[in-house]
């Protein structure tokens, strides 16, 4: 039986980033990546299932200043890769304008206060409530809007649309591969067991053994964490996001709304699509979807297996549903998916706050678009843990990454590679990595942040 140093389960942008880093910047002897689909990045990484945004934290108004700083340096790693790596796929990314839009007096005031906090971190952002200036960036934001309605923006030229599916493919294509570095497609993991110091990964093709296992399989990372006895005090709340699509393009760049703090659901935003440039996509809506993977019915049963069905589970769910902001968001989003009345409600309550002149016949619910974002719930604290999640056990890592996990794929991969290099006594060429990225200036900041993660036991 072949024994690999590392087995990676999941061929999305997180798993492929780790494979790339291990292959190109460490002296690892063997690794294997296992993906159940016929290609890479076909689930949450797919461009139809995410907003295709490289998040820096400059327009994410629900972030704390510290979270914005962390997001900034993480995304700068990926920015460096996109700008400095030769041989990338065509149209893998595009530069664009982006903004966060405040509508109404209370949002405008909140945005102005947020700008004062973010300006020291992002020197390039601009705040304005001047309609003529806003119109120069995004004419349709102003067109048809009531003059009595106050609006303001934080604007940034540092915007990127990214096709994360193509990025996943490029990570694999640009990795150094030999007979001991394998990539398997169309291979489904059925079970994982640990004994004699190795992980046995049972697939529908064969059994593979590894000294360290890294699961970067979305909600299924949590599923296997539960099966292996980890995350006893945690459950996940799978949130599905659907999108509406227009018949023509209304935005020059990305337009986000002021976010509500403390809830894990993104406000509806409007984006040009990287693969469909003559349209605009509005979303996501937020619905509770009791599945681990969108459009995969079998995953409903797998989701049930992740629940503890105890008093803490019930208390946690009740406590979450007591939050009026969460209830309001879920209730309204559920109505947006209903036939006939859903589109009218969505246009009236959401889309026209961004594009006031939008007509009902210019927008439709995009079928087959939208993914699952697992939100981690702490059953002891009875609340949602906001942000990305990582659980580390004995020689195993589980990556559970809701948005904006894709933006931080290289930083997450480096954290995992750092852990693996320590566990297997590998050399990791950090200076070469950051030189290749053209981001030597952030290396110390990134490494300092990794060292403070205490090997990721923040959810244990």
Image (spheres, rainbow, N blue to C red):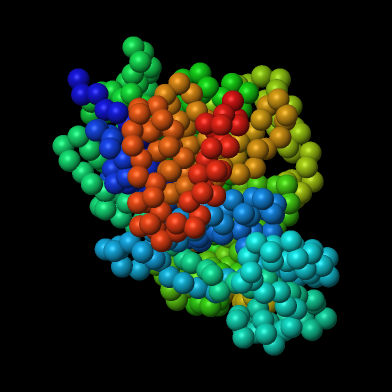
Examine the rendered structure and indicate whether residue 314 appears above or below residue 448. above
Q: Can residue 454 be seen in this snapshot?
A: yes
Estimate the x, y position of residue 212 in percent, counting from the top left.
36, 27
- Residue drawn at x 26%, y 48% is 175
In the rendered image, the residue lying farthest to the left is: 179
Query: Which residue sits at x=43%, y=26%?
Result: 396
Q: Which of 444 and 225 is in front in this view?
A: 444
- Residue 187 seen: no
Q: How many marks are shown on the rendered structure?
A: 0
On the rendered image, what quadrant is the N terminus found in?
Answer: top left
Q: In this view, does 142 lie above or below 244?
A: below
Give the residue displayed 41% in from the left and 30% down from the top.
422
- Name the residue rendered at 69%, 54% in the picture: 65
Left or right: 320 in relation to 39 = right
Q: Which of 392/359 is in front? A: 392
Image quadrant for the C terminus? top right
Residue 77 lies, in percent from the top left, at 46, 55
Where 190 sits versus 375, above or below? above
Check the image and name the residue furthest to the top.
196
Side of 388 where 65 appears, left or right: right
Residue 195, image x and y in percent? 36, 13
Residue 400 x %, y %? 51, 38
């Amino acid at each position: 039986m072949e024994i690999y140093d590392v087995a990676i389960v999941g061929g999305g942008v997180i798993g492929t980033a780790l494979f790339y880093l291990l292959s190109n910047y460490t002296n690892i002897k063997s690794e294997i990546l296992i993906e159940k689909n016929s290609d890479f990045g076909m689930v949450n990484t797919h461009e139809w299932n995410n907003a295709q945004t490289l998040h820096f934290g400059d327009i994410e108004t629900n972030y704390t200043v510290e979270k914005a700083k962390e997001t900034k340096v993480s995304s700068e790693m990926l920015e460096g890769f996109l700008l400095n790596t030769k041989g990338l796929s065509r149209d893998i990314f595009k530069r664009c304008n982006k903004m966060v839009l405040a509508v109404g007096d209370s949002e405008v005031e909140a945005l102005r206060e947020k700008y004062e906090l973010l300006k020291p971190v992002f020197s390039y952002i601009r705040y304005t409530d001047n309609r003529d200036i806003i119109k120069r960036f995004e004419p349709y934001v102003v067109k048809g809007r009531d003059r009595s309605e106050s609006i303001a923006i934080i604007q940034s030229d540092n915007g990127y649309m990214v096709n994360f599916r193509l990025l996943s493919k490029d990570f694999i294509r640009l990795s150094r591969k030999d007979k001991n570095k394998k990539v398997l497609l169309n291979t489904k993991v059925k079970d994982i067991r640990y004994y004699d110091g190795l992980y046995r990964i049972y697939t529908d093709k064969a059994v593979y053994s590894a000294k360290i296992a890294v699961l970067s399989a979305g909600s299924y990372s949590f599923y296997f964490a539960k099966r292996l006895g980890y995350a006893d005090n945690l459950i996940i709340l799978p949130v599905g996001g659907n999108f509406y699509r227009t018949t023509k393009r209304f935005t020059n760049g990305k337009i986000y709304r002021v976010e509500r703090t403390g809830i894990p659901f993104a406000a509806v935003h409007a984006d040009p699509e990287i693969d469909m440039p003559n349209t605009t996509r509005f979303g996501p809506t937020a619905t509770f979807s009791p599945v681990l993977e969108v459009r995969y019915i079998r995953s409903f049963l797998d989701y049930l297996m992740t629940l503890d069905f105890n008093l803490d589970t019930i208390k946690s769910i009740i406590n979450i549903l007591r939050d009026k902001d969460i209830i309001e968001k879920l209730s309204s989003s559920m109505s947006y998916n209903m036939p006939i009345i859903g589109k009218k409600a969505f246009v009236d309550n959401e889309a026209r706050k961004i594009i006031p002149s939008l007509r009902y016949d210019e927008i439709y619910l995009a079928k087959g678009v939208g993914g699952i974002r697992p939100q981690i719930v702490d059953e002891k604290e009875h609340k949602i843990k906001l942000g990305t999640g990582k659980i580390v056990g004995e020689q195993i890592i589980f990556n559970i990454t809701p948005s904006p996990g894709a933006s931080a794929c290289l930083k997450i991969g480096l954290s995992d590679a750092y852990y693996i290099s320590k566990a297997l006594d590998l050399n990791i060429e950090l200076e070469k990595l950051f030189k290749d990225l053209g981001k030597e200036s952030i290396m110390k900041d990134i490494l300092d942040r990794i060292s403070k993660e205490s090997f990721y036991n923040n959810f244990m």
